[in-house]
Amino acid sequence: MPMDAHDIERMIKDAIPDATIEIRDLAGDGDHYAATVTSASFKGKSRVQQHQMVYQALQGRMGGVLHALALTTIPAE
């Protein structure tokens, strides 16, 4: 069963409360999303560390319930 964009946003927001999140369904199938996540907690972290924070927030759903997520992270000022 595909994962709803609102669920993705909620999970990220729960783990990164100050995050601003924009999610787009790329294929209209609920399986392929693009997300832009902006957070002050990314400041001073490498891009890999930023992405790891978001993937950790998704609690292992990547590659399973959530098939694909194109991720852009931006440190907030």
Image: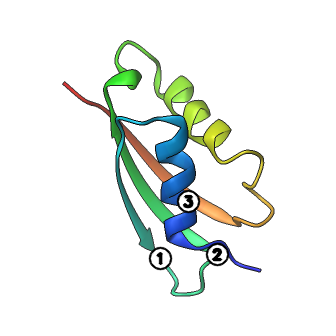
- Choose between 5 and 24: the one closer to the eye: 5
Disc 3 marks a residue whose amino acid type is Ile
Where's the C terminus, which quadrant? Answer: top left
User: Which element is circle 2 on?
Assistant: loop
Q: Mark 2 points at which residue?
A: 31
Q: Position of residue 40 (x, y in %)?
A: 31, 25
Q: Mark 3 points at which residue?
A: 8
Q: Residue at x 34, y 18 (%)?
A: 43
Q: Residue at x 49, y 67 (%)?
A: 6
Specify which label sits upstream in the sequence, 2 or 3: 3
Disc 1 marks a residue whose amino acid type is Leu
Q: How crowded is mark 2: few (under 14 residues within 10 Å), some or many (20 or more)?
A: many
**Image-based side of 17 in relation to 74, left or right:** right
**Image-based side of 40 in relation to 9, left or right:** left
**Image-based side of 59 in relation to 69, left or right:** right
Q: Position of residue 36 (x, y in %)?
A: 37, 51
Q: Residue at x 55, y 59 (%)?
A: 8
Specify which label sits upstream in the sequence, 2 or 1: 1
Q: Name the residue under label 1.
A: 26
Q: Compared to 20, does 43 lie above or below?
A: above
Residue placed farthest to the top in the image? 44
